[in-house]
Image (tube, rainbow, N blue to C red):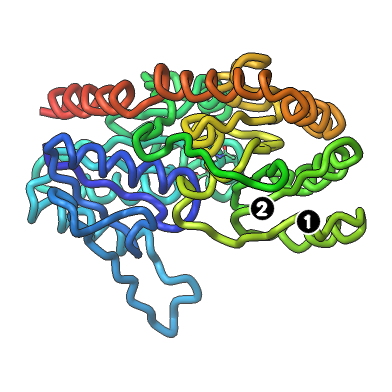
Amino acid sequence: MRIGITCYPTYGGSGIVATELGLELAQRGHDVHFISYATPIRLDTTLDNIHYHEVEVANYPLFQFPPYCLALASRMAEVAERYALDVLHVHYAIPHSVSAFLAQQMMKRRLPFVTTLHGTDVTLVGVEPSYFPITRFAIERSDAVTVISDFLLEETRSVFGITGPVTRIHNFVNCDLYRPEKSDRPRPRLIHISNFRPVKRVEDCIRILSAVRRTIDCELWMAGDGPQRSSAERLAHDLGIAAHVRFLGKQDRIERLIPKTDILLLPSEREAFGLVALEAMACGVPSVAAASGGIPELITNGHDGLMAPVGDTEAMAGHVVSLLESPSRYEEFSAAARKTAVERFATPILIPEYERLYETTVAAAH
Ligand code: GMT
């Protein structure tokens, strides 16, 4: 098939899922056309069957806000026409599904589009009064809608009142790329990876480290960047543990980073799925996480990871200690985490679900 993909090209789970989906589809022989304002961070445009089309947003003194949504729609229609795309697949509803709808209206032939909802496009941004009606409209007008967890399916139905079909396709991981790797380190190492937005509760990671350090000498790597970074740094200083926390900034090759650590911390307030926890599991790194949103669909508590209520940093610290103080228990969790990733969330299991959806969507549109 000839598939157009639009996503946010910067850091963030939705762009990563879209990029890796495109790469997997290209490997399976599909022609994949990325349409965005920049090359997605994990995209290698030299690969066979991968094409990238930049969206240029012309500015004008009259524009306080250059209309990206319109430039994107024009580019989508142009690429779809020139390369005879069969389907457009947009990741993150706002504004991508609106642009896809406009592109569809511009075409002389019927071009179906699929919208994948990733989380904050429903739970946070989508509920903003200024975006709510147009987001609901674009979801309803999509030829197919997918969500990345059952949790998000429920949210989509209750927030937007969507009654039509919505397909749940969980996030996936390439278990050949994300794999365990033995590496020596002087002391245990925890890691947190995110965009440091309030929903991630990054300060909880600092509190967890502080509590764990009452029993075990360990360190924390904080990978990523965002608005909560400076408050997390301040808290580390205030708690007297700054020397044990490294802020690494944005990282491109997290498949190389995660295997150098022992436990991933994911204390999010709300997480539609928690892709980073899955990537860690594939590397044999179990997570200690908040039992929020879709995380329990991924982690089986007490088997391949441990969970506690949102904000309960003492319980999360207790979980970390329980893993680090018993090497045999740690090894069991690590092996179970890898097994879960391979058996339930690996690309060969989930990519065909997207392929089937494209086929039925394209067939229904003609
Ligand atoms: O806010 C983020 O975490 C980024 C966001 C995105 O869309 O880039 O991530 C969401 O999509 C990921 C991939 O599908 C999910 O694994 C994350 O759970 C989800 N984040 C939230 O729901 C907060």
**In the rendered picture of this protein, how many numbered marks are placed on residues?**
2
Residue 177 lies, in percent from the top left, at 37, 40
Residue at (36%, 35%) from the top-left corner?
174
User: Disc 2 marks which amino acid?
Assistant: Met
Give the SS element for disc 2: strand
User: Relative to 130, is 111 above or below?
Assistant: above
Q: Quadrant of the N terminus?
A: top left
Q: Residue at x 66, y 19 (%)?
A: 328
> Is residue 350 at least partly visible in the picture?
yes
Q: Does residue 66 appear left or right of residue 77 in this picture?
A: right
Q: Amino acid at mark 1?
A: Ala
The Cα–Cα distance between marks 1 and 2, rounded to whole angstroms, is 10 Å
- Asked if 253 appears above or below 333 in the picture, the reply is below
Q: Is residue 340 left or right of residue 26?
A: right
Q: Residue furthest bottom?
A: 61
Q: Using the image as rendered, state which of residue 181 and residue 267 is in the foreground.
A: 181
Q: Which residue is mark 2?
A: 222
Q: Which residue is mark 1?
A: 232
In the image, taking residue 247 as reference, residue 336 lies left or right, namely left
> At 57% across and 50% down in the image, what residue appears?
130
What is the crowding at mark 1: few (fewer than 14 residues within 10 Å), some, or many (at least 20)? many
Residues marked 1 and 2 touching at CB (< 8 Å): yes
Q: Is residue 74 above or below residue 91?
A: below
Q: Is residue 308 visible?
A: no
What percent of the width, then of the height, locates residue 298?
54, 22
The disc, 1 or 2, on the residue closer to the chain's N-terminal end is 2
